[in-house]
Amino acid sequence: MLTLLGLIERRPGMYLGKEGEDPDRRLSALELYIAGYAGAVHAHRLRDSGFDQWISFSDHLKTRFEWNLREGPIRAIRGASSSESEAWARFWSLLHEFVHFGFDAG
C-alpha cells in the first residue's frame, strides 16, 4: 500500500486522472483508490505490511491532532485544511512524516 501511494504521489495523473484536474476530485479519487485496495486486501486475505502501516496512520493522526477519524484520514485532513490544494499537500506531508519518523512523530 505505501509503495502504491508513493507511485500515486509521483504520478497522480496516471492513477487518479488528468494532471490539471481539481484537487477535490483528486482527493476523492485517492480515497476511492485506497478503499478499493483495502477491499481487495480483505476479500483475498492478503498480507501487506504497508497496508498494516496505513491503518496505523489514522491512529497517528488521531493522537497527534485529536481529530475525529471516523470517516478516514483524508476527510479529517480535508476538514483541517483551508483548501483542497492545501489538503492534498498536507496529506502527503503527514504521510511522509509518519512513514519516516513513525507513530510518535510530532
Image: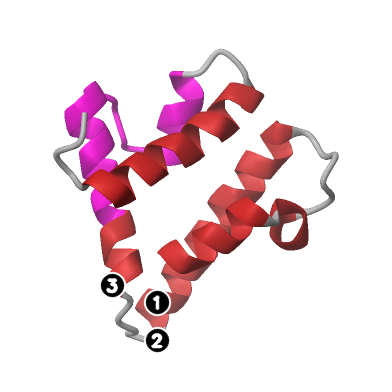
Q: Amino acid at mark 3?
A: Ser
- The residue beneath circle 3 is 49
- The residue beneath circle 2 is 44
- Give the CA distance from mark 2 to mark 1: 6 Å
Element under disc 2: loop
Q: Does the magenta segment cover residue 95?
A: no
The N terminus, quarter of image: bottom left
Q: Predominant secondary structure in magenta?
A: helix
- Residue 89, image quadrant: top right
Residue 92, percent across and down?
49, 41
Residue situated in front as seen by the camera: 2 or 59: 2
- The residue beneath circle 1 is 41
Q: Amino acid at mark 1?
A: Val
- Residue located at (52% from left, 66% from top): 4
Query: Height in image: 84 above or below 73?
Result: above
Stretch of the chain drawn in magenta: 55-80
- Residue located at (30% from left, 49% from top): 100
- Residue 69, image quadrant: top left
The answer to whether any part of residue 99 appears in the image is yes
Front disc: 3 or 2 = 3
Which badge, 1 or 3, is on the more N-terminal residue? 1
Query: Height in image: 76 above or below 11?
Result: above
